[in-house]
Image (cartoon, grey):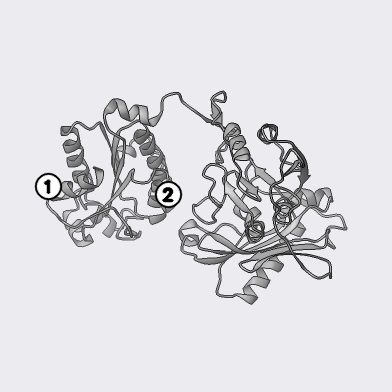
Amino acid sequence: MEIYQRDFSIETKADESPLTEADTTANESLMKLVREVTPELPVLSEECSDIPFAERRQWERYWLIDPLDGTKEFINRNGEFTLNLALIENGVPVFGIVHAPVLDTSWWGSSEGAWKQIGDAESEPIRVRTLPDPENQNWQVVGSRLHGSETFEAFCKRLPSNDRVSMGSSLKLCLVAEGKADLYPRLAPTCEWDTAAAQAVVTAAGGEVLDTRTLQPLRCNQQESVLNPFFIVCNQRDRRWQDALVQCLGHDPELPYEYRVNDSKAEVVWNHTSITSAQRANIKGHKGKCVWFTGLSGSGKSSLANALEVELNRQGYHTMLLDGDNIRHALCKDLGMSQADRTENIRRIGEVAKLFVDSGIMVITAFISPFKADRDGARALFDEGDFIEVHVDTPINICEQRDPKGLYKKAREGKIIDFTGIDSPYEKPDFAEVVLQEEKVADSLTKILCKIR
């Protein structure tokens, strides 16, 4: 509060959001606190967020901190900023505390319930309210003070009678948790640290924080990006607001586009096409799927992928084979073999493969793809059952004996670096649909075809 009451400098972060002395001071204090109380738990904070997903995805329990949620409100001195601290277990916020210093108010929630405390007064239990009958009482819909949108306005217009309340920071979620608001649709970008603590409070108070696309609860640490999908905070599910969401988020036949959360550097929407994936598949006589071969160089991926395409083609399937070396001749010719470049290489291939699958084509990829997180990211693009991971588990000594391109020899001589199996790791799949260990080609194809059918 001492910083809030005096002049302070304002910096601009890489994402063009503001940063003040209060952000860094609060971050240092909260980081110190949780490390003293639970030194065994990792910590992710908005101001210390450069932890690779390959490391984060191993965390079962960790602290998630937003040291100053609502920095713009802090700068504007309207008091609507908070300090957020959440405990995450297997992606779920199980404890959260939200503190508003100017309001001298705290909200917290856990498996034991949710409470609110003002100053030194006794804490009081809080609970979401029952959604009122709009014929007798208007619904209360809370929105961002600084991040309004046409979509938010369109959503509210499609609801029964309602009043709109503007508020900053995670205070919006707390209004729903304590029964002062019924809905908070967030149809603009946020990050996991913005919402996790207040989500724990809302959930403990009997409400829900739901992904607008799936109406499933938000989960943390499920992907490399810490961006949330668009979400809605509610006291209870109701067909009326669900229909309003569907109409506003691109599914209305009169709207040819949909707002989807994304990390594109451009201002984009998702444009719907008239022809669906199902229609494309119907013309071809089969659904598209991705068969993803992974394994060491020299393991036999390309040979097996080629044999599979020949067999599928013989059986009348429409196919496309994406080979690692071939792709690097053009689409990925700007990428080297560093870990970052390999990750980008697989990201691009995953997106291309998804396009082929959406067109009803059986796409086969043959890439070393050495990192689990990258393969998991590719898998996440596809519907359940449409991604078939094939691990060609040939021992490295056999791969090195084969050395069809002479790359192992060059790696041993130090002529090339970052070579998988020599000076760069290969992370074996834990749950590949098919694992091949030097079977005959015909037997290998039989295993794979069983999964395709």
Report the residue marked by disc 2. 377
**Viewer-side residue, 397 vs 279:** 279
Label 1 is placed on what type of residue? Ala
Residue 397 lies in what quarter of the image? bottom left
**Viewer-side residue, 332 vs 323:** 323
| Rendered view: 99 above or below 252 | below
Residue 148 lies in what quarter of the image? top right
Position of the N terminus by quadrant: bottom right
Question: Percent position (x, y) of residue 288?
Answer: 31, 36
Question: Percent position (x, y) of residue 428?
Answer: 32, 59
In contact (CB < 8 Å): disc 1 and disc 2: no
Disc 2 crowd rating (10 Å Cα; few below 14, some 14-19, many 20+) is: some
Label 2 is placed on what type of residue? Gly
| Label 2 residue SS | helix
* Label ID, residue 442: 1
Q: Is residue 282 left or right of residue 42?
A: left
Question: Percent position (x, y) of residue 32?
Answer: 67, 71
Q: Is residue 95 left or right of residue 51?
A: right
| Rendered view: 117 above or below 294 | below
Distance of mark 1 from mark 2, alpha carbons? Answer: 30 Å
Question: Percent position (x, y) of residue 173?
Answer: 69, 52
* Label ID, residue 201: none
Does residue 46 show up?
A: no
Does residue 447 show up?
A: yes
Q: Is residue 56 left or right of residue 156?
A: left
Lower position in the chain sequence, tag 1 or tag 2: 2
| Label 1 residue SS | helix
Residue found at the very far right of the displayed protein:
6
